[in-house]
Amino acid sequence: MRRGKPADEIRAMLAVGTRMAKGRVGEAVELVRAEPGKIARLVECLWDDDAGVANRAADALERVTRGEPEVLARWREPLLGLMAEAAENKLRWNLALTVPRLSLTSAECRRTAQTLESYLEDKSSIVRTAALHGLADLTRQDAALLPSVLEHLRVAERSGTAAMRARSRILLRKLENPTPRRAKKKQPA
């Protein structure tokens, strides 16, 4: 059995299924985790002409970056640009969760926050819920965003969809009552 070129392997996995189907995302995630050099091809698929491929690439990247967001550091600027221009819901909600995990400058945090705030006007409840989560994540890097993020969460907690209300309650608890770090107990001398 002849294998395709390595660069085509990830795209082939992501090309399986309809536009919003999960397809073989899990396999693509495992492949990139096993062979980190293939992440470049996964990132390239975000701009694929096939919306299904781009959506699944965003889903895979969101999963890959849960434990190690630094793998996307070199694509920070292109991802910020894509996030601002993305139209597909699945692409938007996955970028809303992924981009705030990256190490961003204060200016990039503000730029990302503006994009996420625009996502709060999206028709999709999932996009709006992911935007709230992304905004909350950004406050870890830029505390100046905290007052406006808390306000967005409070509004969503009162008047958002069920998913937005539930996520807002969770995020508000975390942001308003951060768990204090436990001090090490001193050993008796």
Image: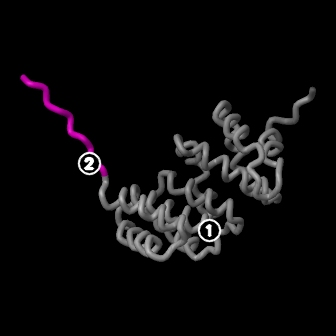
178 over 115 or under it: above or below: above
Residue carrying label 1? 84
Q: Which image quadrant: the C terminus? A: top left
Identity of the residue drawn at 58% across and 71% down? 119
Secondary structure mostly seen in magenta is: loop
Q: Which image quadrant: the N terminus? A: top right
Identity of the residue drawn at 37% across and 56% down? 174
Going from the N terminus, do you reach mark 1 or mark 2 first? 1
Residue 179 falls left or right of residue 33: left
Residue 26 falls left or right of residue 2: left
* Residue 35 coordinates in the image, percent (x, y): 68, 32
139 over 41 or under it: above or below: below
Element type where label 1 sits in the image: helix
* Residue 24 coordinates in the image, percent (x, y): 76, 43
Label 1 to label 2, Cα distance in Å? 35 Å
The amino acid type of the residue labelled 2 equals Pro
Identity of the residue drawn at 46% across and 67% down? 110
The amino acid type of the residue labelled 1 equals Ala
**Residue 77 is a magenta residue:** no
43 over 86 or under it: above or below: above
State the extent of the magenta-drawn residues as a range. Answer: 179-189
Identity of the residue drawn at 67% across and 68% down? 85
Element type where label 2 sits in the image: loop
* Residue 158 coordinates in the image, percent (x, y): 44, 75
Visible residue check, residue 10: yes
Residue carrying label 2? 180
Q: Of 61 and 165, which appears nearest the observer?
A: 165
Q: Which mark is residue 96?
A: none
Determine the residue located farthest toward the front in the rendered image: 162
